[in-house]
Image (tube, rainbow, N blue to C red):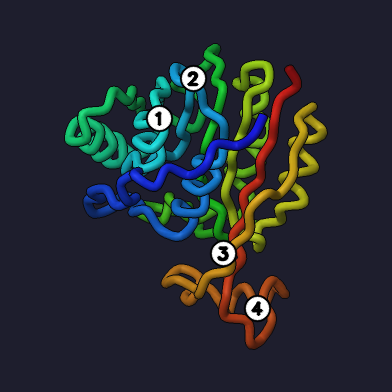
Amino acid sequence: MTPAPPDDTTPPLASAAPPGVYAPQEDTALLADALAAQPLPPGADVLDVGTGTGALALRAARRGARVTAVDVSWRAVRAARRNARRAGLPVRVRQGDLFAPVHGESFDLIVTNPPYVPGPEGSRGPRGAATSWHGGRDGRAVLDRICREAPALLSPGGTLLLVHSALSDPGRTVGQLRAAGLGAAVTHRRRIAFGPVLRARADWLRERGLLAATEDREELVIVRAEAPC
């Protein structure tokens, strides 16, 4: 099937983000590009995991999909519901940990922008806004769970679109999804300047050998995985 062209009339990604809720950034924009290129017939069932402000959920809803958005943060859930109401779009928003709120359901498309930035582990784990980006020591605390759990929620022929940093091992993501029976590959890449989080962790990342001494740009990737029909 030929991917649908991006919709030039789609509103920008900006959506209201109260304190403590991850605002749409470059990774959201890259995932939005992948979503725009993904065939999505009207009435398709779409799941947005880690929805934040609901920006990607609203993009899918504008294309006529039936959209469910999930976030572990109550602040994010309230923000996504508020943004959906303001946009006049019927998005079902649920609070819970990853796929727990949609256990037993299936989806034609799952999109997710999970926490993926590697960082030192504190005794109490991330708190507040840091839960939106901190992915554990190797960046994969949530990524590995998605690779294990998402395949069971895809309808036959369904697709997973997942964004994360090249610092958190895209090859491992692709390998795990292929091992689960999906066809998987990196389909989009984008290099961006370090944001505040990576600037704050740069020395630690260099000590671990994840960054070169002079490196000041991060590569983001989209992993696309498709279930067999």
The reply to whether dot 3 and dot 4 touch (C-beta < 8 Å) is no
The amino acid on which the numbered mark 3 sits, given as a three-letter code, is: Pro
Q: Residue at x 73, y 17 (%)?
A: 229
First in sequence: mark 3 vs mark 1: 1
The residue carrying mark 4 is 206
The reply to whether dot 4 and dot 2 touch (C-beta < 8 Å) is no
Q: Nearer the viewer, mark 3 or mark 4?
A: 4
| 30 sits to left or right of 165 | left
The amino acid on which the numbered mark 1 sits, given as a three-letter code, is: Arg
The residue carrying mark 2 is 44
State the CA–CA distance, disc 3 to disc 4: 13 Å
Pinpoint residue 199: horizontal percent, then vertical percent. 48, 76
The residue carrying mark 1 is 63
First in sequence: mark 1 vs mark 2: 2
Q: Nearer the viewer, residue 228 or 168?
A: 228
Name the disc covering residue 117, or none: none
Q: Nearer the viewer, mark 1 or mark 2?
A: 1
Q: Residue at x 59, y 39 (%)?
A: 161
User: Which type of secondary structure does the marked residue at label 3 adopt?
Assistant: loop
Pinpoint residue 118: horizontal percent, then vertical percent. 59, 61
The amino acid on which the numbered mark 2 sits, given as a three-letter code, is: Ala
Query: Local crowd at mark 1 within 10 Å, few (<14), some, or many (≥20)?
Result: some
State the CA–CA distance, disc 4 to disc 2: 43 Å
State the CA–CA distance, disc 1 to disc 2: 9 Å
The residue carrying mark 3 is 120
Image position of 115 with respect to 216: above or below: above
